[in-house]
């Protein structure tokens, strides 16, 4: 159902890989709400080809950019402004990757080249994206920038591995850059801390099936889905949240404030 919340707004959406991706579902919702955007992903993800289906459905252009390359980001921002006909109102950073997670290296046995790469892709890329937007003066006043995070930034989830540290760094960048973006350009910056969600990145985490069931049982409203996250993001891109900034916002069915739930206790007492 559309409320035209984003009518006339223009943006860039990073990270739609396949229809399970949170960014994919968000692009569909942003389109329904009247927003126009450029889709972007790393060259290797574009070669998989599925993003073109999304581009067709949403009348959008796809631009290849590795989020660790300043040159790619510079071209992306400049070309996006040309295609969209001016400055940008919203940006979604929906990017995460850990080679240690992917290759099953535990937190106590890191390959630091991989740790470094994961930090670069998952967290520092957010700084790069914002610095590129800032230096190009690419954002309209009252624009909104959102990145996706996970609660392992605050609490221990052993198998989330080095991604926990990457998310803590990501959330800190949102606050630090958000200050300058707010003061100098009237742009807001927030992170959404999302429930475990069955996507390619999510399912890469060891024990994901147990993880997602546990979170669901612990949350009074159950896990937030990719669509719930997309809807929350739409609200943060809209003019209804103009002075929400520097926040890490939980979209998790209440999980982050729980100690234990009755359904979890029932399970343990069996
Ligand atoms: N799935 C979950 O359980 C969950 C929970 C909380 C937060 N998140 C976060 O949501 C975001 C989106 O992940 P998702 O779950 O939709 O999975 P996904 O695998 O669909 O998306 C991850 C995206 O990152 C992109 N990417 C990787 N390296 C890149 C690079 N160098 N440059 C540009 N893009 C690159 C991938 O191509 C992919 O599109 C991530 O930040 C993830 O950590 C996911």
Image (tube, grey):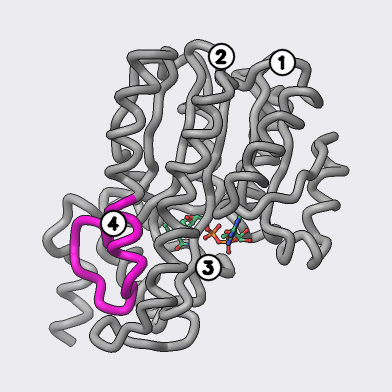
Q: Residue visible at 22% across and 52% down? A: 256
Question: Label 4 to label 2, Cα distance in Å?
Answer: 30 Å
In the rendered structure, find residue 140 and report the number of the disc placed on it: 2
Q: Which mark is residue 113?
A: none
Q: Are marks 2 and 1 in contact (CB under 8 Å)?
A: yes
- Alpha carbon of mark 4 to alpha carbon of mark 1: how far? 36 Å
Mark 1 or mark 2, which is nearer the start of the sequence? 1
Q: Quadrant of the C terminus?
A: bottom left
Is disc 2 placed on a helix, strand or loop? strand
Q: Is residue 236 above or below residue 29?
A: above
Marks 4 and 2 in Cβ contact (< 8 Å)? no
Q: Position of residue 174 (x, y in %)?
A: 35, 37
Instruction: Point out the tag, 3 or 4, that comes first from the N-terminus.
Output: 4
Q: Is mark 3 within 8 Å of ligand 1?
A: yes
The reply, left or right, for residue 243 in relation to residue 26 is left
Disc 4 crowd rating (10 Å Cα; few below 14, some 14-19, many 20+) is many
- What secondary structure prevails in the magenta region? helix
User: Does the numbered disc 1 mark a residue whose Cβ is under 8 Å from ligand 1?
Assistant: no
Q: CA–CA distance between discs 3 and 4? A: 15 Å
From the image, tell me which residue sits under label 4. Answer: 151
Which range is magenta? 152-169
Viewer-side label of 4, 2: 2
Question: Which residue bears the numbered disc 3?
Answer: 201
């Amino acid at each position: 159902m559309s409320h035209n919340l984003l009518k006339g707004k223009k943006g860039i959406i990073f990270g739609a890989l396949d229809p399970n991706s949170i960014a994919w579902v968000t692009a569909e919702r942003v389109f329904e709400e009247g927003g126009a955007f450029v889709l972007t992903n790393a060259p290797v993800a574009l070669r998989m080809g599925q993003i073109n289906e999304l581009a067709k459905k949403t009348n959008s252009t796809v631009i290849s950019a590795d989020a660790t390359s300043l040159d790619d980001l510079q071209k992306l921002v400049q070309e996006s402004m040309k295609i969209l006909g001016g400055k940008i109102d919203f940006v979604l950073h929906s990017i995460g990757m850990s080679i240690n997670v992917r290759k099953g290296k535990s937190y106590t046995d890191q390959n630091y080249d991989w740790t470094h790469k994961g930090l670069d892709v998952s967290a520092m890329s957010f700084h790069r994206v914002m610095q590129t937007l800032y230096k190009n003066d690419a954002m309209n006043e009252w624009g909104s920038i959102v990145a996706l995070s996970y609660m392992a930034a605050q609490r221990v989830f052993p198998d989330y591995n080095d991604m926990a540290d990457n998310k803590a760094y990501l959330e800190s960048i949102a606050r630090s850059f958000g200050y300058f973006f707010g003061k100098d350009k009237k742009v807001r910056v927030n992170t959404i801390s999302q429930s475990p969600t069955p996507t390619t990145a999510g399912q890469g985490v060891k024990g994901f099936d147990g993880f997602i069931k546990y979170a669901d049982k612990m949350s009074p409203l159950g896990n937030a889905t990719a669509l719930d996250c997309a809807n929350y993001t739409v609200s943060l891109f809209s003019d209804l949240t103009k002075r929400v900034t520097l926040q890490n916002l939980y979209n998790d069915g209440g999980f982050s404030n729980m100690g234990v739930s009755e359904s979890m206790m029932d399970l343990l007492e069996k």
